[in-house]
Amino acid sequence: MNASLALTTLVASILTVSSVFAAEPPAASIPSASTASPTQGFAAPAPSGPASTTPAPSPVSEGPAAQAGDAGGAAAPPEEAMRPKLEFSEIWAYLMEGEEAFLDSSRPITDLGYFGAGLGISGNLVGVPPRAKLPAFEGRVHLVVQEVSNAALTHFCLSPDYPLRDALVADIVAASKDYDGVQIDFEAVSSRDRENFYAFLARLKIGLGEKALSVALPAYVKDPRDGFSYQRVAAIVDRIVVMAYDEHWSSSAPGPVASMDWCRRVSSYAAAKIGPEKLVMGLPFYGRAWADKSLSRAYKYSSLAKIIGDKGIGDIQRRDEIPYIEYAETVNVKVYFDDSASTVARLGLYLGASVRNVAFWRLGQEDSAVWASISVAAAPAPPDQGRIVQPDYSRPPYAQP
């Protein structure tokens, strides 16, 4: 899921944070892959004890962790210790291979998206992480296959005009042997390849059989002109993770990674198109920074001469005959990020909108106090709701070329 930013210390900063506090809901056990495997559907896990009174997050935290991995959190004040937790049927989290130390098996995580696999230059599957690197995790583990930037490679892998598609499907099915499911995160699918993408998913679902197939899709607030059809994808796969983040991005105007009003509109649209059983709302654990000046770039001599004059730089130094200068510059920085309080507020918004399943991007970036505020719902799902029901493969969309 492509949207992480490490926040660094800069010369001067203007910190803008919007944190809203929300109540939370009783702790439950994490489902075991052996007792709640995708062959049995995504049934909600059974409770393993009384409701927890673990302290809720403090309204003042250390902020988001950098992408490199600080995941600190603040202790909860006594007056908030008895708040109930926010309960969800499924709590997904994403983990990068090489960052296994960020996975704490005591966290209320039912499903783990394990990153590393992608498309090689010839369209083959590469970088599959060994499932054995997560021996202590008892929930479901999904192999994530990503391609986020190369539209040309994606086209050749999806088009039925080339032999790459069926070979890639076979590679993914084989790689999923030790996994509970597969998630596709293709973010460079052009509008001309939309139908090919749906057909690819249908073929992959046939190959996976009773293993879970999920897809990560962009966030929309209305029917996209050239985007994916949530309804078409939902007819094929078992879960759709809506990446409800990067409302503002590195080259946009400064703003929240996921504002509350935007999240409300995204979840409303997604629920109407996907349905509550298959919808998983994604949440960010990261922040973004914007500076009012970008100084790292190429300069014309005339531009440098102006800087030298404006700054009154009289000492032009040379190293091996090459001139260079040094000067100080004030850079104002605005940072939007999420702490435990704003994350809990967003979770409360989704819970109020009847969202059953959530996903966090990604482990190692969070204010760890958030985990004290959420738990896996104890009540089992109604019959056939959220379970994998094998489709009729002789009918569209599975019968497509």
Image: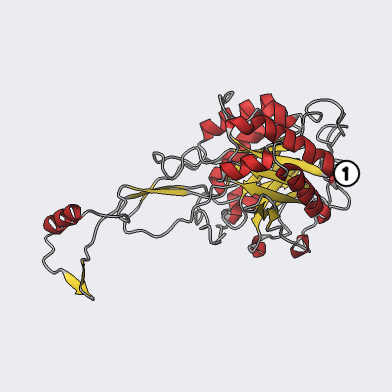
Judging from the image, the colouring scheme is secondary structure
Tally the numbered discs. 1
Foreground of the two, 194 or 278: 194
Disc 1 crowd, CA 10 A, few/some/many (<14, 14-19, 20+) = some
Say which residue appears at 62% left-offset and 42% top-offset.
154
Residue 194: give x, y in percent of width and height: 64, 31
Q: Is residue 150 visible?
A: yes
Foreground of the two, 114 or 365: 114
Say which residue appears at 52% left-offset and 31% top-offset.
261
Residue 10: give x, y in percent of width and height: 36, 58
User: In the image, 198: left or right of 22?
Assistant: right
User: In the image, 300: left or right of 355?
Assistant: left
Q: Name the residue under label 1.
A: 39
Residue 348, quarter of the rendered image: top right
User: In the image, 215: left or right of 370?
Assistant: right
The quarter of the image holding the C terminus is top right
Identity of the amino acid at label 1? Thr
Q: Is residue 52 visible?
A: no
Residue 255: give x, y in percent of width and height: 43, 40
| Rendered view: 297 above or below 239 | below
Residue 9, quarter of the rendered image: bottom left
Foreground of the two, 347 or 281: 281
Residue 95: give x, y in percent of width and height: 66, 55
Mark 1 secondary-structure assignment: helix
User: In the image, 58: left or right of 107?
Assistant: left
